[in-house]
Amino acid sequence: MTSQTLATILFLVFVAFTLVITFWASRNTKTAADYYAGGRSFSGVQNGLAIGGDYMSAASFLGIAGLIALFGYDGFLYSIGFLVAWLVALLLVAELMRNSGKFTMADVLAFRMSPRPVRTAAGVSTIVVSIFYLLAQMVGAGALVGLLLGITDPAGKAWTIVGVGVLMVVYVVFGGMKGTTWVQIVKAVLLMGGAALITILVLAKYNFNLSSLLGAASEASSKGDKMLEPGLKYATDAQGLAGKLDLISLGLALVLGTAGLPHILIRFYTVPTAKDARKSVLWGIGIIGTFYLLTLVLGFGAAALVKFAPTDTAGNIAAPQLAKEIGAYFMGDVGGTILLAFIGAVAFATILAVVAGLTLASSSSFAHDLYAHVFKRGNVTDREEVVVARIAAFVIGAVAIGLGILAQKQNVAFLVALAFAVAASGNLPAILYSLFWKRFNTAGAVSAIYGGLGSALILVIFSPVVSAPAPAAGKPVTALIAGVDFHWFPLSNPGIISIPLGFFFGWLGTVLSKEYNAAKYAEIEVRSLTGVGAEKATGH
């Protein structure tokens, strides 16, 4: 049996299993609280697993292993950034968000401000960030299925992207938050199991001696000992000051972005109490931290054992290729085939689950913030709202499929880092000011979101990631539009400029406006710290 047949069978088994979960959840999804927040019935441990499942996306599993395999030490920076980011979420946001909101990020902002402009801004921002993030997952799905099923032509990959899109819409439309959370939990367990298995096998090959593994990786790599030192990818001598600033910019975006990601924020609403919100973040950090330590072994293992094509600048399929090599080493070709099929199916499941979470975040923001509170001014039944959320899931799914097909050749990590920069520039300033600054008002919230979002998008459009001169013969294409050069912003990641700008616009908008509601601030302060009245929060 070929690895392709086996991978397809394993993958179909997983899809069938998750569809059964979704169908089961759909029978228990009756109210808006069930659809958006899983009826707030998940324990801290279950939600912690689901947070891990939501966060360990295609970018973490495929992207980081690939970056470490190609650039060694510098690739590990992503792991550290993604992990440290959780401390910001835990200490500043998780518990307060759970106490003050109902279903979406905008509930917290709209509580003490004029609801319509704030909800419009938060809804737009949620949808923009989610679509950037969705794009990365779709592109990862296309590349992965290409490897598993041996599809190389663009039309075949386009059809796989359509398939992923259809499946994710089914999960969200029928299962809501309950179905999506259970899919995340199953996937988190499988992914941790798969990654741990490969890590143990790789370490066993080198007698559980990390130095031997790192030595083998630097010998096998064309870069030698430089693999184990900083400076291969970021802040290289050739890049000068811009390279150093780019590194700081990327770090800022990764560390501050998590606390502003809509699909992570809505996870805090699925638990009954603030204590469970804290507990779920601690479990999430434990799972995610362990996973990122495993990526170190996966990345250097791939550097030591996998032969990369010179044209492969992204290394997006390093982890599945490593599974094949290490499986073959211990269990012969059949073992390699089985392990490749298993890891491929798990990686694909990872993409499906993350995509479902993102679609749920953006469709519920559209239904709850834009439709219910902006268009209908709050005069809607729960049932109407859920129907609109389901329709929105179809539309957002279609947009993601279309853009995913267009962006097939792009690097997955670039798209995700971009989503983080946009979330940190627009959403984070508004959330932090709203929770901690007495004087903050509607004008401040709207200018923080639009100012941060707008500046991040403009800087990205005029950065070297979108346009660059045509590369020399044999050199990889790194920009979206090669051969046309209109960039004037030297950095690849806008975070270092756009995040402070988001905070600045929030301050400026607030100071220029006279609006100030002391009573509402006092109420949200008590509520965010104690949780009193949160269940009844409507955010009107």
Image (spheres, helix red, strand yellow):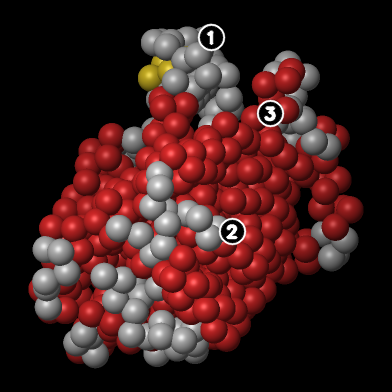
Mark 2, residues whose alpha carbon is within 10 Å: few (<14), some, or many (≥20)? many
Q: Is residue 259 above or below residue 232?
A: below
Do tag 1 and tag 2 residues touch (Cβ < 8 Å)? no
SS at badge 1: loop
Give coordinates of residue 231: x percent, y percent. 77, 31
Q: Residue visible at 20% across and 64% down?
A: 373
SS at badge 3: helix
Q: Residue visible at 28% across and 60% down?
A: 115
Nearest to viewer (mark 1 / mark 3): 3
Would you identify the image quadrant in which residue 449 lies? top left
The answer to which of 441 and 272 lies nearer the viewer is 441
User: Is residue 20 visible in this depiction of the protein?
Assistant: no
Q: Is residue 300 left or right of residue 387?
A: right
Q: Is residue 288 left or right of residue 381?
A: right
Residue ID for mark 1: 472
Give coordinates of residue 93: x percent, y percent. 55, 66
Q: Residue visible at 42% across and 77% down?
A: 269
Nearest to viewer (mark 1 / mark 2): 1
Question: Which badge, 1 or 3, is on the more N-terminal residue?
Answer: 3
Question: Which badge, 1 or 2, is on the more N-terminal residue?
Answer: 2
Q: CA distance from mark 1 to mark 3?
A: 26 Å
Residue ID for mark 2: 323
Residue ID for mark 3: 245
Give coordinates of residue 185: x percent, y percent. 46, 78
Given the image, on which type of amino acid does mark 1 rest?
Answer: Ala
Nearest to viewer (mark 3 / mark 2): 3
Q: CA distance from mark 1 to mark 2?
A: 34 Å
Given the image, on which type of amino acid does mark 3 rest?
Answer: Leu
Q: Residue visible at 74% across and 18% down?
A: 240
